Image: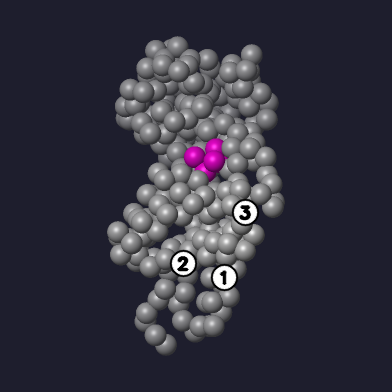
């Protein structure tokens, strides 16, 4: 059994199915060896490529890519060569042969054969963004988000963020904790995209107790203590008042109902 291993980075401007199939077929010829792959679908910007290359260098990965844009293919090749990475360009040679024989240039349109609408790609991008900036207090997420949710722990910030991202909105959520300063970008709220969430304290107490039980902890932990919850609410209320943002009570709402209220502030 060899200790050597190979890691493939499968990069594509669409789903990456073609490149994944190639890697899996090749890997199947080495059943007892350690061959792994990481998938990077819907890569359509040089910024995203830079992130992938930087990570690939750390893991000494082989870049296998399919993208219809010549500019992006050349960019991946250039970055790979400059960083000493091996790569497999699955698109250039077939396109060159077809162009030569037909005398027609390729359209260079994403997923032309399996056309998907822009709303779909917007949802994918929004969902990736939302998962990346879940429960964080970072400037990048706050700056790039369409919506920023703030509130104490267990006020449905994460499930609401994911639902909003499925609707195509990049959503960041920031926990309000007395011991942690809120990022100045949230306090400034210059784009009026911050929405506060609140909930009935008694219900929150019950939710936190259940959460502790699932974690195998006793219900006497500070996290679920009524005095602690009161302290958090006082802090959160003062922050949301200072921001001047709308505040939605999620006590009697399901996620879809709260989402409708959130979007009403932006689309109303």
Image: magenta residue range: 125-129
User: Percent from the top left, x then y, of residue 76?
Assistant: 41, 55
* Vertical order, 174 against 48 (above or below): above
Comes first in the chain, label 1 or label 2: 1
Q: Position of residue 238 (x, y in %)?
A: 40, 15
Residue plotted at (48% across, 27% down)? 148
Q: Name the residue under label 1.
A: 22
Few, some or many residues within 10 Å of mark 2 (<14, 14–19, 20+): some
Locate residue 180 relative to residue 142 in the image: left or right: left
Determine whether label 1 and label 2 are within 8 Å by CB: yes
Q: Which numbered dot is residue 88?
A: 2
Task: Tell me the SS state at disc 1.
Answer: helix
Q: Nearer the viewer, mark 3 or mark 2?
A: 3
Q: Can residue 226 be seen in this view?
A: no
Give the label on residue 104, or none: 3
246 to 168, vertically: above or below? above
Work out which quarter of the rendered image holds the N terminus and state it. bottom left
Query: Which element carries disc 2, helix, strand or loop?
Result: strand
Question: Within the image, what quadrant is residue 24 found in?
Answer: bottom right
């Amino acid at each position: 059994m060899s200790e050597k291993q190979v890691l493939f980075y499968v990069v594509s401007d669409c789903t990456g199915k073609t490149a994944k199939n190639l890697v899996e077929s090749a890997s199947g010829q080495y059943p007892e060896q350690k061959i792994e792959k990481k998938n990077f679908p819907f890569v359509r910007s040089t910024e995203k490529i830079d992130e992938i290359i930087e990570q690939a260098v750390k893991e000494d990965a082989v870049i296998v890519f399919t993208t219809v844009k010549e500019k992006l293919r050349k960019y991946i090749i250039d970055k790979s060569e400059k960083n000493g990475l091996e790569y497999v360009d699955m698109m250039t040679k077939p396109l060159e042969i077809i162009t030569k024989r037909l005398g027609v240039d390729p359209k260079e349109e994403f997923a032309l054969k399996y056309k998907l609408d822009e709303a779909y790609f917007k949802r994918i991008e929004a969902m990736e963004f939302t998962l990346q900036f879940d429960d964080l207090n970072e400037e990048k997420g706050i700056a790039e988000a369409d919506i920023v949710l703030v509130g104490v722990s267990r006020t449905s910030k994460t499930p609401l963020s994911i639902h909003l991202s499925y609707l195509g909105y990049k959503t960041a959520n920031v926990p309000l904790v007395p011991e942690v300063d809120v990022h100045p970008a949230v306090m400034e709220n210059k784009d009026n995209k911050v929405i506060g969430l609140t909930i009935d304290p008694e219900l929150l107490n019950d939710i936190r107790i259940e959460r502790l039980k699932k974690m195998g902890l006793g219900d006497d932990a500070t996290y679920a203590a009524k005095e602690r919850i009161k302290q958090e609410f006082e802090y959160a209320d003062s922050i949301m008042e200072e921001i001047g943002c709308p505040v939605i009570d999620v006590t009697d709402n399901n996620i879809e109902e709260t989402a409708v209220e959130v979007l009403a502030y932006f689309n109303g």
